[in-house]
Image (cartoon, grey):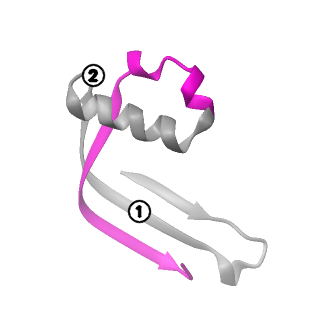
């Protein structure tokens, strides 16, 4: 599972998304290459990092919970 949350001092603006599912470590192959490409495209700091040498965690969701004002 992983959580994405939005915190705010105004508690009426709190929100989160909870994704539960089956996780898999991806070490190489087309899925790994695509994930590295997408991460580097989105996050500039990853362009200089050797993330292509690291595993990627892939989650296949089976339940998604959304709470708060999104």
Placement of 19 over or under 31, stated as above or below: below
- Residue topped by disc 2: 27
Find residue 45 and report its image quarter. top right
Locate residue 28, reporting x and y percent: 25, 21
Element carrying mark 2: loop
Find residue 58 and report its image quarter. top left
Labels in figure, total: 2
Query: Seen in the image, is 54 located left or right of residue 27?
Result: right
Query: Seen in the image, is 43 located left or right of residue 33?
Result: right
**38 or 65, which is in the foreground?**
38
Locate residue 33, reporting x and y percent: 31, 29
The numbered dot on residue 18 is: 1
Q: Based on the picture, tell me whether residue 8 belongs to the magenta stretch.
A: no
Residue sitting at 39 percent across and 15 percent down?
53
Say whether disc 1 or disc 2 marks the residue closer to the N-terminus. Answer: 1
Q: Around disc 1, counting alpha carbons within 10 Å, would you say few (fewer than 14), some (14 to 19), or many (20 or more)?
A: some
Q: Based on the picture, tell me whether residue 59 belongs to the magenta stretch.
A: yes
Q: CA distance from mark 1 to mark 2?
A: 25 Å
Element carrying mark 1: strand
Find residue 68 and report its image quarter. bottom right
Q: Which residues are magenta?
A: 45-70
Which part of the image, by quadrant, shows the C terminus?
bottom right
């Amino acid at each position: 599972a992983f959580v994405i949350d939005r915190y705010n001092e105004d508690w009426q603006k709190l929100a989160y998304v909870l994704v539960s599912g089956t996780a898999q470590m991806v070490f190489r192959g087309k899925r790994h290459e695509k994930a590295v490409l997408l991460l580097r495209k989105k996050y500039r700091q990853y362009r200089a990092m050797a993330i292509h040498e690291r595993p990627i965690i892939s989650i296949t969701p089976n339940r998604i919970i959304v709470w708060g004002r999104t």
